Image (spheres, grey):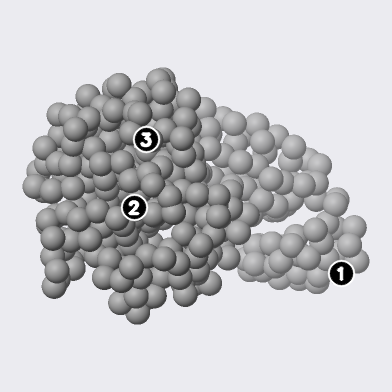
Amino acid sequence: MKILHTADIHLRKGDTKGIDVLQWLIDKGTALEIDYFIIAGDLFESDADASVLRSETKKIFEKAKANFLIIPGNHDAKSFSHDYDYGKNVIQLTKTPFEIIELNGLTVCGIPYQNKKFSECVKNIPGEIDILIAHGTLYDASFIFSMLDDKETEYMPVYPANLENLARYIAMGHLHSHSIEKNYKNTKVVYPGSPIALDTKCEDKRYFYLINIDKRNLKIERIQVDISPYWLKKELFVFPGNEQEILNDIESYLAGLDVTKIMPNIIINGFIGEKDRDFKNKIDEIENTFTEKFENMKITIKIQPWDHIIQNRMVKNFVQKTMELEDRLRNKVLEITFPVFSDILK
């Protein structure tokens, strides 16, 4: 059985990009001759958006050759039930704490988003689940600490111990930024990431997963959603003496990017002296120059007055000692050390 796994499309009223990506995924699924199409939560941005877009999505689903398996996510938790018609080829897995169905000899379990721990939802699940669909936050120490400030880590916590030998393949939704693959004993856990770059944290190419599964074998493949551009972050650090170098770097960087796929996200940290207050104006000029080239572009300036850091005795003494260095070497030393000073003095 062939299955397409995606999640977190976040359809919004008045925004056609999400509909375009959904249609692209369905067309891709048709070309791949899939049997089922999994949406692991947050098809809609909100329940209000679902009310507006339900009839349109139903028409899209009904034209598809595959059948759909959909669970509610935290954004559209009230958008699915037997009172809502998404078409005869859509199976809504809405029963709590879980719902089990049989498909082509495989056992499929759906866990809709619930305001509780994942462990509470799965404690009575029987063994030998082939595919489990869920929407929540996987707290794995190998990646989650980089996301602790992210709102997407607040919902239905899932811990690795909850997943070991739980199912052969777990189709997750909720983490948008990147695709993630993890193995917990005999369980394969996959987040496809959102197929759309919903915000600047979506810095990688967008993907969906193709699953080929029967009772003996499981094969998965990550495939790019090449209709979707994605954010690419570049961080720079400015200080008195390297302003023009930074400006030149930004211009050459933007000139060399592929406009069809990339949305630049440039973040400038550092310090500016009194005589260089026109730095921001020059950044504005660069941004205006490249606005038409990119569908979206963001330049964030987080700079402080040079006087703020040079008042510190340690920093002042260090800067004075670098005056003896050749200019190029001095700038390189300051480039390395000033971000450290900046963090220490916060």
Please determine whether, in this image, residue 149 is positioned above or below residue 44: below
Q: Quadrant of the C terminus?
A: bottom right
Could you give the CA–CA distance between mark 2 and mark 1, rounded to whole angstroms? 63 Å
For label 2, the residue is 99
Tell me which amino acid carries mark 3.
Answer: Ser
For label 3, the residue is 81
Task: Name which residue lies at 35% across and 29% down.
Answer: 83
Are circles 2 and 1 on residues that touch, CB within 8 Å? no
Asked where in the image residue 212 lies, by quadrant, the reply is: bottom left
Task: Name which residue lies at 50% across and 49% down.
Answer: 114
Secondary element type, mark 3: loop
Tell me which amino acid carries mark 1.
Answer: Met
For label 1, the residue is 314
- Where residue 298 appears, as percent x and y from the top left, is 53, 37
- Is disc 2 surrounded by few (<14), some (14 to 19) or many (20+) residues within 10 Å? some
Q: Nearer the viewer, residue 153 or 150?
A: 153
Earlier in the chain: of badge 3 and badge 1, it is 3
Q: Which mark is residue 251?
A: none
Instruction: Please tell me how many numbered marks the rendered image carries.
Output: 3
Residue 319 seen in this snapshot: no
Q: Nearer the viewer, residue 188 or 127?
A: 127
Earlier in the chain: of badge 2 and badge 1, it is 2
